[in-house]
Amino acid sequence: MKKLSGLLFVGCIALTGCEGSTDGDLTPTPPTPDPTPPALSADVCYLMKTTKGDITLAIDLTNMPITGKNFKQYVDKSFYNGTLFHRTVNNFMIQGGGFTTGLKSKPGDAPIKNEAAVGISNKRGTISMARTDDPNSATSQFFINVLDNPHLDASASNYGYAVFGKVVDGMDVADQISIVPTKNSGGFANTPVQEILINSVATTSCPAA
């Protein structure tokens, strides 16, 4: 595998059927990213309760209408309750939203269009959609960047990963999740040795600007 195969945004090691890889953005002519991207808007906020603590997320429905609405729809039907942070990589990101306890896949809805060309960068604390090599394959899985990851942004040669919100409280919890002991087993890579559950995700008040 290429070097970036280690950045798979999925629980499994193989590329086929996984959601998703930073490898092989081979679809021709990625859209040109906006050179002056908008600032993230906090249109709705969610309290994510995990077995490691609470994380508050502000989601942008204004600049990222497809991606933000997609996440909101999953929250509204309690899809994320009982799912895992199934992949954690120190100094990179934490990923969740697609597997339940025992690493059982939880099928999501139809894939959405990739909005990464809006140009919002994968900076520390932002939340983005995971996907496969197909740029328009994101469903339910998401990741939180624990460092600035500009190599995940849209560019002239890469469709990128769509940022649609940010952590506004509880980044210390995300940091702690990113450094838990992990294992590679049964086709899954960088999986926490002790499962980290998302107990619930529910609407909460957005912090004052």
Image (spheres, rainbow, N blue to C red):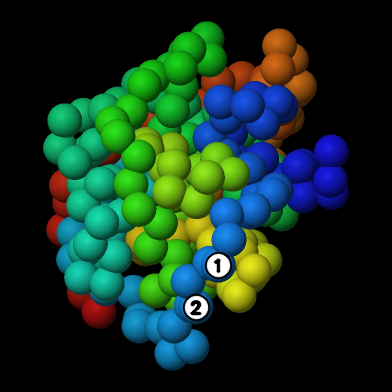
State the count of labels.
2
Q: Amino acid at mark 2?
A: Thr
Q: Is 159 located above or below residue 11 in the figure?
A: below
Residue 193 appears at what percent x and percent y? 67, 20
Q: Nearer the viewer, residue 186 or 205?
A: 186
Observer-nearest of 128 and 148: 128
Residue 5 seen by the camera = yes
Q: Residue at x 41, y 33 (%)?
A: 97
Left or right, 71 with respect to 185, comes to left
Q: Circle 2 sits on which residue?
A: 32
Q: Residues within 10 Å of mark 1 (few under 14, many from 20)?
A: few
Vertical arrangement, residue 109 with respect to residue 149, above or below: above
- Image quarter in which the C terminus is found: bottom left
The residue located at (15%, 37%) in the rendering is 76
Q: Is residue 52 visible?
A: no
Secondary structure, mark 2, is loop
Q: Position of residue 114 (x, y in %)?
A: 40, 56
Which secondary structure, mark 1? Answer: loop
Task: Check disc 1 and report the residue beneath it.
Answer: 29
Look at the picture and state if 159 lies above or below 119.
above
Rendered location of residue 67, percent (x, y):
31, 55
Residue located 75% across and 23% down the image: 183
